[in-house]
Image (spheres, helix red, strand yellow):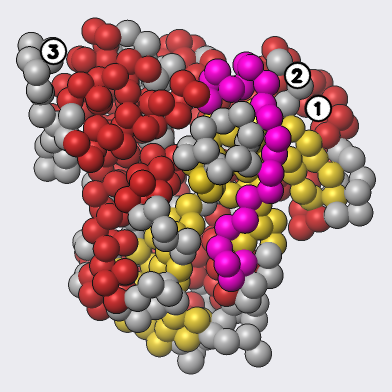
Amino acid sequence: MRKPQIITISGAGSCRTPALIGTLMQMKERFPVRRIIFMDKDLSRFHKIEDYCRLLLKTYSPQTEIIVTDDLDQAYSHCDFVFCQMRVGQSRMRSLDEKIPLKYGLVGQETCGPGGFAYGMRSIGGMKEMVDCVRRHSDQTWILNYTNPAAIVGLALDRLYPEDQRIINMCDQPYSMMVSFAKILNVDPKKLRARYFGLNHFGWFTDLYDTQGNQYFDQLRDYLKNHDFRPYNAEQRTKSWLDTYLRVNRMLNCVPEYIPTTYLQYYFYSEEIVRESDPHFTRADETMQTREKEVWDLCAKAVGREELGDLPVLTSPVFGSMMVEVAESIAYDLNQEFIVMTRNRGLIDNFPSDAVVEVAGTLGSQGVKGIPYGSIKPFYKGLMENQYAYEELTCQAWMERDYTKALQALALNRTVNDFDKARAVLDDLMEANKEYWTLEKRDGSCI
Ligand code: G6P
Ligand code: MN
């Protein structure tokens, strides 16, 4: 049997946790867990789902020890893996990240544009506190980060801990798209491989083949020219996600050489997306009324029960499965291929070597190993350089608390592009986020 692991779930109060536990139970032979530490600074959220999680574990893995804590040292002192899905500011701040930009006619999204900027500034602080605590206790613990915006968090952590090979930043969207591709192509998703380049939430698939060497890229592009792209992922079937996938068809019909990831829609259809957004009801509201409510309703039924009985086992076939497969590949040195984030160091040979890029790569006991991509063409290079400068300025603004750098970041962001709007939205976001981050105006900037 494989050596059982100790994991800490950071941000355990997330409504995604029950399905993650269900997935861990489903995959318990592949990734056995000796102890789970549920960590959340706000345990009142975790308490809503606690009984259900306990029943899942009692039913399917009674030997797993359970610890519930809001204490950093207890959470991070003895664990093999941290599964980090914290959301600093919770859904309440997500909602503001999405709504404030819309007031100025700007895209309101949690990871892209000004909302992503504000969330990034919150996440860097929360992540740094966690990583510092983990590393005070051990340099061996693997930190698997799913906290968004992963592009900003990944870059900031790379700058703050440049030697640390055990912080792995992951995103499930390329994985999710590949599962949908596999479905369309009628191929086993486990056998599908991609060539891919970009930054997180800013990338392109450039080839697709299986482990036997069969090529699928042209077939898939032909299919997407004439058929609506539909997500396989059951979590992505609400209207906003369905619209998002359809814009992949449209982007592909403009520039058919590569398949863009869904998040590029915010940069190429900014105006349309703003027009179609409801400033009083954004994705945060949608998730609270759908996923969050469904999970809480189910978990409410578990409160006080001794047995799981007829309650369904929630699983997460995309997000949760990927999290567990990533941990499995590292723990048992499987070197499975994923779309990974890593410092470039020449993987994309005509892009800055200290950027954090997203490419195909393997994960094993040595950490991430990116597969060299080669060079990228001017259109993509131009877009990525712009976006990377935005990401870098955002990280610098956080580290130096520098208002001007924050303003530069926002003005550079392709969803903004206007100093007056950048300034207005920055001031509003800064006010809304004052308990999380502040910036200083220096040299008389922007009086
Ligand atoms: C995708 C992205 C994640 C993001 C999630 C948001 O999976 O890769 O980074 O957190 O979508 O989904 P939601 O359903 O919360 O809008
Ligand atoms: Mn993501």
Quadrant the C terminus occupies = top left
The picture places residue 110, in percent across and down from the top left corner, at 38, 35
Q: Tell me whether circle 2 and circle 3 mark residues in contact (CB < 8 Å).
A: no
The residues colored magenta run 364-384
* Residue behind label 3 places its C-beta within 8 angstroms of ligand 1: no
Badge 1 marks a residue whose secondary structure is: helix
Q: Name the residue under label 3.
A: 446
Left or right: 41, with 356 as reference point: left
Of tags 2 and 3, which is closer to the observer?
3
Vertical arrangement, residue 364 with respect to residue 287, above or below: below
Q: Name the residue nearer the viewer: 53 or 120.
A: 120
Mark 2 vs 3, N-terminal side = 2
| Residue 34 percent location from the top left of the image | 47, 86
Q: Distance between the residues labelled 3 and 1?
A: 47 Å
Residue wearing tag 2: 256
Q: Which residue is drawn at 79% across and 50% down?
A: 192
Q: Residue beneath label 1, please?
A: 221
Q: Which residue is drawn at 46% across and 64% down?
A: 166
